[in-house]
Amino acid sequence: MRAILIDDEKYATELLAMKLAKLNRGVQVLAQFNQPEAALEFVRETAFDVLFLDIQMPRLNGFDLLAQLPSMPFDVVFTTAYDQYAVQAFRVSALNYLLKPVQESELRAVIDQWQQRGKLPLQPTQYALFQETYQSPAKAPPARIALPTQEGHEIVEIADIIRCVAEAGYTYIHRQSSPPLLICRTLKEVSQALESSGFVRVHHSHTINPAFLRKIVRQEGGYLLLSDGAQVPVTKQKRDYLLDQITGIERR
């Protein structure tokens, strides 16, 4: 992997370079820049694989820098200290995102993922959705999510998702108005991404959108009936939680 590091804070690029070397994963840091304007010509003219890019920089932030490039034939790993609901959604969307201070375990996961899948340049749909969600109000969960498929990425309205079902290391996304979508993400990753939108993991293999819940059945060990006719198993703890939520709605 050939990498370029851009961050307006010198210690941040030096620390990231040191951690990349410590991982011993064959990452070659071609250049480090602390003035994003100075990086533009090098990025335009150099062949490389991954750009580690800070978003919040004075004069020229990460989004503005990318906007000045004619194309993006490389991966981007966004880095920032700014946290919000969308962080997990970015990762599910195959957008690599490191929250400062960068943890070695997170960095290792990003490198390992890249080496397993090979070079996958940032797609315009991914980037547009990332920018849209990142710049939305911090307390507002994202309205859409980019889900990785074999063909690329499909932009899905979160409100249209009925349930998510684990399938080995993959997840089936069942939607209200479209066929099920199989994505190469674990149910744990998907559940974390959708948690801020009210989704509940009711079983080790199932996460649901409570908006589509039609019945809570106690018999036969307990299950949930959803609007698409699916009978979803539920743990007693999550069944009681859902009952409490519904009761609370009825009392208002």
Image: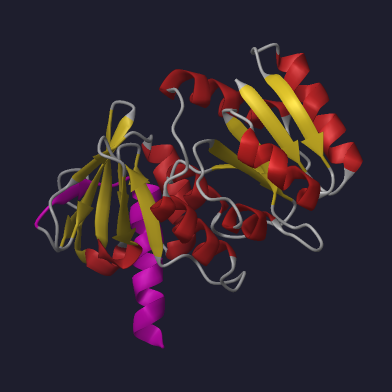
230 magenta-colored: yes
- Of all residues shown, which one is farthest toward the right? 11
Residue 99 visible? The answer is: no
- Vertical comparison of 3 with 73: above or below: above
Query: What residue is at 40 percent from the left and 69 percent from the top?
Result: 245
Figure colour scheme: secondary structure
What stretch of residues is rendered in magenta? 229-252
Query: What residue is at 51 percent from the left and 57 percent from the top?
Result: 130
Residue 63 is situated, as x and y percent measured from the top left of the image, at 62, 58
Q: Nearer the viewer, residue 162 or 143?
A: 143
Specify whether 50 is left or right of 157: right
Residue 32 is situated, as x and y percent measured from the top left of the image, at 80, 34
Residue 231 is situated, as x and y percent measured from the top left of the image, at 14, 50
Specify whether 78 is left or right of 192: right
Specify whether 39 is left or right of 207: right
199 magenta-colored: no
Q: Nearer the viewer, residue 173 or 30?
A: 30
Q: Would you say the magenta stretch is mainly helix, strand or loop?
A: helix
Query: What residue is at 74 percent from the left and 58 percent from the top?
Result: 56
